[in-house]
Image (cartoon, rainbow, N blue to C red):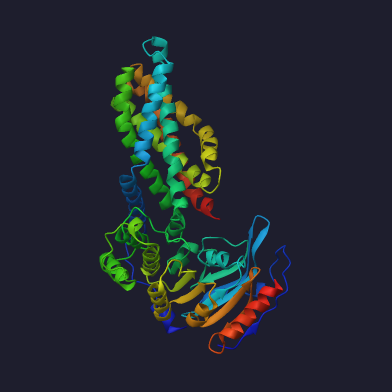
Amino acid sequence: MTGATKLPLERPTVGVEPAAGEEAIATPCPASCAVEARGLVKFYGTTAALRGCDLSVAWGERVALVGPNGAGKTTLLKVLATLVRPSAGRLALLGLDALRHPAAARGGLGVVAHETYLYRDLTAAENLALYGRLYGLDCLERRIAAGLARVGLAGLGPRRVSTLSRGQQQRLALARALLHEPALLLLDEPDTGLDEAGQGLLAEIVRESPAAVVLATHALERALALADRVAILSQGRIAYSASTADLSLADLRAAYRAVASAD
Amino acid sequence: MNERGKQAGGSRAAPTAFSAYLRVVAALTLKDLRLESRRRETIAGVLVFVLLVLGLFQFALDFERAEARRLVPGVLWITLLFAGLLALGRSFAAERDQGTLDGLLLAPIDRSALYLAKVLATVVMMSAVEAVALPVFAGVFDAPLLAPGVLLTVFLGTLGFAAAGTLFAALAAQTRARDVLLPLLLLPLLVPLLIGAARATDDLLAGAATPASAPWWELLAGLCALFLGASVLLFDSLLEE
């Protein structure tokens, strides 16, 4: 991993033609990266949420996305999760063309977002069983018990989600995302509602998971502590990217301020 | 390729594609029915609506008169269609409001399974309502609404309604004006279904032999097949954001 890479901050033309050189990536890096995104553009009406965003994540690499509100973090994660189809650009996930074969790519994704994706009137175990069946998993009972234990909810399987605290629901959302042992974890501010112990658990899971991780967060300290690389998103594109190996919190803050002031 | 990444990816059961598809449909249908059995919102609400409308029709029309009795098939089907709209309005709106729809869309499943599961769950819930409402209608109107031919007509009408309605409920759930949009989109499409169902019921209540209703049943079955087939093909692109 190399040091900081300062990427151009000038605003792209909003009209959205593929960036120069983009055509060269006809089949974007299918096997060497868990994520290979090139020139991602997403419009909501006339508002551009992503403006030619490029992102590569190696297998097993942990990348933290930071950036001011409205920078496009959540939209980028939704595109990577195949929940939102980009207006333009190319996306390969886990060696698959995710725009042509999204269903195949989804099998290797685990997603934790602001919403827990849990049914409040089902029990914790019933929620995990439902998702396990959708992912075609075998040995479901064993997996559910292990998943609940892993997030510190052993014994709470028969409890309805509506009776769990927000923090417990977020832990359960983590268990749901990890149930099928995904090769790519997409985490959008996953510490929402988690207490100190829960945040420690989340950090442990991110560090120990063999999966590639893309983590969106507002906390620069957390990004630095958990990720191998930090990318600052600004106005819908990656404006700064650096390895955390040789990056101090002060350097990251300075880079963040520079990017934010350029907005 | 990094070894950390290669280790990821859980073991999966390996059933045939079709049996796996059916299992997903069954899991999603049972989920909806289990949620309904705990919330008791849809069936109870729709049933109360049906009985209220029946009571209003009783006040508005004098069913002792022979001319009014000819309105029974229309009254029955209009009531069932509007009641069904209530059930359909909940099916996707509840998923979207609670943020669970994205969880389902993240799963590596053919999204038509989600559509079929919603159709099945709606048919089961509407059938539960009809199981109570039809005997009440039959008693109030003194009409043989529990005859096998009428029950077949009601089943086909309900299936066709759920098949078309589920597609539009998914579409409407993505908008803020879904409560208004769903009937506006759906009711014009249901005109042929309503004609077939009401005419078949009319023939049967008039004491016609079962074969007299056969063309209407064929129309209803054809509409069911058309709505189901078109919706299965369109559903995935409909959910694209």
Residue B109 makes an appearance in the image: yes
At a point 39% along the width and 9% down the height, the residue shown is: B65
Number of numbered markers: 0
Query: Quick one: A104 or B45, which is closer to the camera?
Result: B45
The vertical placement of B95 against A63, above or below, is above
Res. A56 image quadrant: bottom right
Pinpoint residue A221: horizontal percent, then vertical percent: 52, 80
Res. B155 image quadrant: top left
Pinpoint residue B228: horizontal percent, then vertical percent: 44, 43
Pinpoint residue B97: horizontal percent, then vertical percent: 47, 51
- Indicate left or right for A155 with A260 as reference: left
At a point 57% along the width and 60% down the height, the residue shown is: A85
Query: Quick one: A77 or A67, which is closer to the camera?
Result: A67
Pinpoint residue B30: horizontal percent, then vertical percent: 32, 50
The vertical placement of A207 against B115, above or below, is below
The vertical placement of B43 against A145, above or below, is above
Query: Quick one: A227 or A201, which is closer to the camera?
Result: A201
At a point 42% along the width and 69% down the height, the residue shown is: A194
At a point 29% along the width and 59% down the height, the residue shown is: A159
Residue B200 makes an appearance in the image: no
Quick one: which residue is furthest to the top in this view?
B65
- Indicate left or right for B23 with B182 as reference: left
Query: Quick one: B80 or B146, which is closer to the camera?
Result: B80
Query: Can you say which quadrant of the picture contains the C terminus of chain B?
Result: bottom right
- Indicate left or right for A52 with B86 as reference: right
The vertical placement of B152 against A122, above or below, is above
